[in-house]
Image (cartoon, helix red, strand yellow):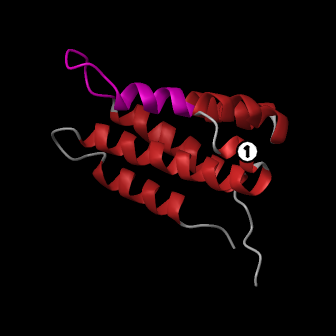
Amino acid sequence: MTDYLPFQLLALARGVVDKPHGGTVAAALLTRQSLEVTLDRYWSHRAPAVAASPMRTQLLCLATYADDDTAGRAAIAWSTLSRACHRHPYELAPARTEILRAADDVERLAHDLAVPKVPL
């Protein structure tokens, strides 16, 4: 059984991506939160000390614990979403396709990094 919170956040992100007035920024925030939850749960299970580290450290360590492809996808998604969440007022809002592509990548990461729940 996998954790559903990352997938619920992604569903919300996809639901608001077409909303006017900042829909893509809100979707980027929700998608980044999904990635953060995914990585937090992964590190809490695999290497709790890494879970308390900054995100850059977590992303660098991911290649050692998972694989290079997964680590690369996570780093690109984090970078894309962070840039979308912290844009300057003079910049255009992130494109709908950019956010949806990042959401697809985060969904795949959520599946790849899911920690199975152990029944008590």
Residue 103's spot in the image, x, y percent?
49, 44
Residue span colored magenta? 77-94
Place residue 111 in its image quadrant: bottom right
Q: Secondary structure at mark 1?
A: helix
Would residue 25 be found to the left or right of residue 59 on screen?
A: left
- Residue under label 1, please give it: 49
Residue at 38%, 52% (x, y): give it: 14
111 relative to 56, above or below: below
Residue at 25%, 17% (x, y): give it: 91
Residue at 46%, 42% (x, y): give it: 32
Would residue 69 be found to the left or right of residue 4 on screen?
A: right
Q: Quadrant of the C terminus?
A: bottom right
In this view, the residue in front, 66 or 12, is 66
Place residue 97 in its image quadrant: top left
Task: Report the residue that reaches farthest toward the left.
Answer: 21
78 relative to 66, above or below: above
Task: Tell me if residue 80 is in the magenta stretch.
Answer: yes
111 relative to 83, above or below: below
Residue 4's spot in the image, x, y percent?
55, 67
Task: Report the residue that reaches farthest toward the top.
Answer: 90
Residue 5's spot in the image, x, y percent?
51, 63
In this view, the residue in front, 18 or 51, is 51
Residue 18's spot in the image, x, y percent?
26, 46
Would residue 92 be found to the left or right of residue 85 on screen?
A: left
